[in-house]
Image: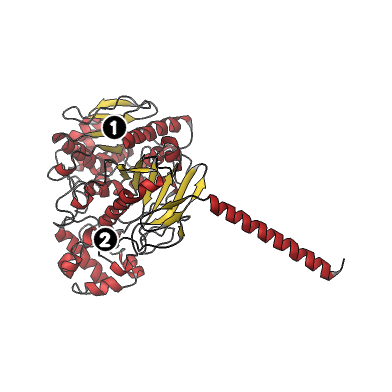
């Protein structure tokens, strides 16, 4: 065969392959799910029967409006691909793309069929500083398939971009700056209200749920007039927000950040135009009010967007009709303090000194140690350390939320997750965040420490089914769990979740009473 003939045949074969590939791509595109939003059409993908739309824009680029409320998207023509997660807000701790153009959400749905399914909108944790809605633990496919629901995750502005309070320095134009991250969430919930029916969801049956900072943002939204009517059930998972940041402390922090950037307090316009990378680098600035770490930004009680604290002096009556799940894990602080080997080798002699700085409530460490030794004589010093830091740092906020709801007759169900991680020799137990893969039924996802054994499966079945029931009806009771009674005073009935779960009245009562002697304020307030 001549060289010329081989070249002709090779070219023909290549053309055939190219044409075949193009036809296959066209076929896939033709089968790809397409939904119509108020701003334009979006094309997703189908994965094992679930329609998945990633990186759907719900707000315009925030870079031109840094520290200002975001605007809705500009409508587009044609069909926009929704096949990859959108960027996260600029931050210190992340391994994905970041941008001030970060107002994107992600949707998992069983069908684009007008099914009027319950909608579960998840707000990620990471305090108010870090995170995104694209963590593998938050993948909504299994929940959507299991419960015939629509799952939504969301990105929004964080840290100084979302919560840097400049109203006292920049005047009325920046009046909302301390809460624009929360206003992003309001914009996302408005998008859900206006568009989710096109994805098979019911805009009148929206459950918002979030862990840690995500839960904290949701209880803040419950006190915000702008969010009224957008959430019909709320579930918090270790979202122990009781107080927001006050405007005086928020201004002190804004001044400190500007000084670190070489700006005077009156140069807020210059702050709006600095490269985002410089603002992120300045987040390492030591906090001017809290000696423990870098500068803090979160929701601000500004008298406008947020006119009151989330749960002080009481639960907000304007959201009393919204049913709530309020959850916590038994060993919260093992997530924060379990990475230091010294905390697993404490002695009785050095325990009080090590314990004191980790308590939020101002109670004498030696008194705390003595009381724990009387209550739990079998505990080691390290076990006392983790138990007391949880009860004196993370747990009280959850209790206050449930108690304040009970006092105004607002429906709330409380859980305590006792089932702990079987990995790492069981050192972390039921740590802060451990409930996320259990609720999402994502036991095998990257980052999960639940294991995939029968015990973890039994707990995931209970938690995911209870959250799905709550999304459907506003009541978490279902066949997978014992009858779950509301949290009422003085019984304080709580669902203690384990391989076999049970209702317990006032669990850890003695620990609760020990720390109730001191007032609780969110650390850094």
- Res 387 → quadrant: top left
Compared with 361, 157 (above or below) is below
Residue at image coords 41%, 35%: 147
* Mark 2 burial class by Cα count in 10 Å: few <14, some 14-19, many 20+: many
Which residue is labeled 1 in the image? 475
Residue 35 in view (yes/no): yes
Give the residue at the far right of this rendering.
1
| Closer to the camera in the image, 205 or 438 | 205
Foreground mark, 2 or 1, reads 1
Instruction: Give the position of the N terminus as an image quadrant.
Output: bottom right
Residue 359, position in %: x, y? 23, 45
Label 1's element? Answer: loop
Q: Does residue 134 appear left or right of residue 20 in this picture?
A: left
| Closer to the camera in the image, 487 or 234 | 234
Residue at image coords 14%, 46%: 312
Residue 495, position in %: x, y? 29, 29
Circle nearer the N terminus (2, 1): 2
Which residue is labeled 2 in the image? 295
Compared with 56, 150 (above or below) is above
* Number of marks in picture: 2
Residue 262 in view (yes/no): no
Would you say the residues marked 2 and 1 are in contact, meaning their CB atoms lie under 8 Å apart?
Answer: no
Residue 496, position in %: x, y? 31, 30
- Res 333 → quadrant: top left
* Mark 1 burial class by Cα count in 10 Å: few <14, some 14-19, many 20+: many
Compared with 170, 349 (above or below) is above
- Res 116 → quadrant: top left
């Amino acid at each position: 065969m001549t060289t010329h003939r081989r070249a002709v045949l090779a070219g023909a074969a290549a053309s055939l392959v190219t044409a075949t590939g193009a036809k296959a791509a066209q076929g896939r595109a033709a089968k790809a799910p397409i939904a119509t939003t108020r701003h334009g059409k979006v094309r997703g993908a189908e994965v094992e029967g679930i329609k998945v739309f990633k990186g759907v824009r719900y707000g315009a680029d925030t870079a031109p409006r840094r520290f200002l409320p975001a605007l809705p998207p500009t409508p587009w023509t044609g069909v926009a691909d929704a096949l990859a997660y959108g960027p996260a807000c600029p931050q210190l701790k992340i391994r994905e793309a970041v941008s001030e153009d970060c107002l994107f959400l992600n949707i998992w749905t069983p069908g684009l069929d007008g099914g009027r399914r319950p909608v579960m909108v998840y707000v990620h944790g990471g305090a108010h500083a870090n995170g995104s809605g694209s963590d593998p633990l938050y993948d909504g496919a299994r929940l959507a398939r299991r419960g015939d629901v629509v799952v939504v995750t969301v990105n929004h502005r964080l840290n100084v971009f979302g919560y840097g309070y400049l109203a006292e320095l920049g005047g009325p134009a920046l009046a909302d700056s301390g809460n624009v991250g929360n206003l992003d969430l309001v914009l996302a919930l408005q998008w859900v209200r206006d568009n989710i029916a096109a994805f098979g969801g019911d805009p009148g049956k929206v459950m918002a749920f979030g862990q840690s900072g995500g839960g904290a943002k949701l209880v803040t939204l419950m006190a915000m007039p702008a969010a009224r009517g957008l959430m019909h059930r709320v579930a918090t998972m270790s979202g122990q927000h009781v107080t927001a940041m006050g405007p005086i402390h928020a201004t002190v922090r804004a001044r400190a950040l500007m000084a670190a950037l070489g700006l005077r307090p009156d140069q807020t316009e210059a702050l709006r135009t600095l490269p985002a990378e410089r603002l992120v680098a300045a987040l390492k600035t030591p906090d001017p009010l809290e000696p423990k770490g870098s500068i803090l930004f979160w929701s601000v009680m500004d008298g406008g967007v947020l006119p009151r604290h989330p749960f002080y002096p009481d639960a907000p009556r304007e959201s009393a009709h919204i049913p709530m799940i309020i959850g916590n894990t038994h060993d919260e602080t093992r997530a924060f303090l379990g990475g230091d080997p010294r905390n697993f080798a404490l002695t009785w002699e050095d325990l009080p000194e090590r314990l004191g700085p980790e308590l939020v409530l101002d109670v004498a460490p030696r008194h705390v140690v003595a009381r724990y030794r009387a209550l739990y004589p079998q505990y080691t010093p390290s076990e006392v350390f983790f138990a007391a830091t949880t009860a004196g740092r993370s747990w009280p906020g959850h209790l206050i939320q449930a108690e304040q709801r009970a006092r105004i007759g607002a429906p709330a169900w409380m859980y305590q997750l006792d089932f702990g991680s079987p990995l790492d020799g069981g050192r972390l137990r039921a740590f802060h965040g451990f409930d996320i893969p259990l609720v999402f039924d994502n036991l095998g996802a990257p980052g999960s420490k639940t294991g995939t054994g029968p015990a973890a499966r039994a707990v995931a079945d209970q938690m995911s089914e209870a959250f799905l029931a709550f999304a459907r009806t506003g009541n978490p009771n279902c066949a997978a769990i014992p009858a779950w009674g509301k949290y009422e005073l003085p019984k304080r009935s709580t669902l203690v979740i384990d391989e076999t779960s049970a209702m317990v009245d006032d669990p850890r009562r003695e620990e609760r009473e020990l720390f109730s002697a001191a007032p609780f304020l969110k650390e850094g307030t």
